[in-house]
Structures are given as C-alpha cells and as structure tokens.
Amino acid sequence: MAVVQKSLQPRSGPGLGSGGLAPTNTLVVSLPGITRAYVFLQKSIESEREVSEVWWTISAWVTLVDPLAPDTSLNKVNLAPSLLDIAPLGAGLMLVAGAFWIGLPEAKEISFKFSTAADEPQGDAQAFGVGDTTPHNHFGLFSAPFGHPRHFERLVDPLPTDPKVLEQLELDGRIPPASRAQRPRGR
C-alpha cells in the first residue's frame, strides 16, 4: 500500500490558475490490478478556522491496462456519478470518498479530478489517495460514509414550486437538501 498526495490549487477567475493555465488538481492512484481507491482531503492550511467552508466536486475514472476494444484507444472509463459533491470538511483531515472498479477489464490506475466553484478558492488543500487490489462487488464513485445507512427523508409528492414552502419542508426534514449543483451561488 502506498499513499499518493496532491496539492490542490485554488482557481482564480473562470477556471484559470496562475499563468493562464487551468490547474490540473488530479490525484492519480497507480497500482497494477487496482480495484478501489479512497480519498482523504485536508483543509487548506491558509484557513484560520477549524472547519472548511469550501464545497468540492470530485469526478473519477479508471485507466485500463489494455484498450477496451481492439484497434481503439478506449482505455479510460468514467465512474458514475460523473460528479460527486463533497460537503465542506468538518475536520482538518477527512475520508471523503471511495472509487470502486470491478476488476475486469484490469485497471492500472484510478484518477480523481477535484474542482471548486470559481467564487470559492481553496488555497493549498491536500488530497491523499490510497488504493488496493482486494476483490469486491462494488463499482462507482461514492461519498463517505459508503455502506452505512443514512436517515431517509420523507418525500413530498407532488413537490411544491414555491421557494418558501420548499425551504420550510427542507428545514422540517421532509425533503433532502438540494445538491450543490442545484443551489444558487452566493456572491
């Protein structure tokens, strides 16, 4: 087992880093026959608070040892969901996600792409990845805690369209909160 580390860079402007190039913010966990990888996030050392206020978005893909079909270059497979929201960190270092590959076809690495909204720069946050080759029956990208039941909110049907009614239903625990992508951005 090896731990891989990646320093995550803040975005300045519309997705651009210093020098006009977009930061890669990609963590690659390489291991022959890899079947899973876990992601730990460490909040920015620039933050003076104990917790982070930054929402991260993670996507993950597997790089296969050989192309999926002969005479093609199809060797990268995205894991569903294509984007996973990670809530602000409640501690300095947290296990936040796991990516699972079925093992067939054989993979050589699992990669994670991290991003934040342009109005939420996060300076010098760290991502850590740990992979292994133990067989399992899972596939996809999951936020932590994976495999543990969460409280199932009661659903309201039909869903009202009045924002004030929706907000009150959310506060009452009758509908789950909107995902990060569905929430309006604050300025």
Image (cartoon, grey):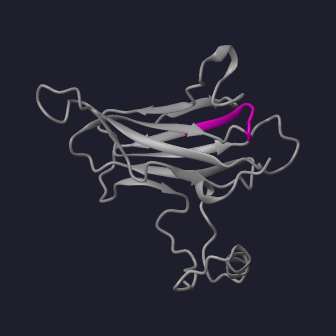
Classified by dominant secondary structure, the portion drawn in magenta counts as loop
Is residue 84 in the magenta section?
no
Kindly indicate the quadrant of the structure image that contains residue 176: bottom right
Kindly indicate the quadrant of the structure image that contains residue 126: top right
In the picture provided, is 48 more to the left or to the right than 96?
right
Task: Name the residue furthest right.
Answer: 48
Image height check: is 58 above or below 25?
below
Residue 135 pos. (x, y %): 29, 52
75 or 155: nearer the eye? Answer: 155
Please report the residue visible at 54 percent of the width from the left and 83 percent of the height from the top.
Answer: 155
For the N terminus, the image quarter is: top left
Task: Name the residue furthest top.
Answer: 19
Image height check: is 90 above or below 122?
below
Task: Name the residue furthest front.
Answer: 162
Q: How many marks?
A: 0
Identify the magenta region: 119-128
Please report the residue visible at 55 percent of the width from the left and 58 percent of the height from the top.
Answer: 144
174 or 7: nearer the eye? Answer: 174
Residue 111 pos. (x, y %): 44, 36
In the picture provided, is 32 more to the left or to the right than 154?
left
Residue 43 pos. (x, y %): 73, 42
Please report the residue visible at 64 percent of the width from the left and 69 percent of the height from the top.
Answer: 177
Image height check: is 163 above or below 88?
below
Residue 31 pos. (x, y %): 37, 33
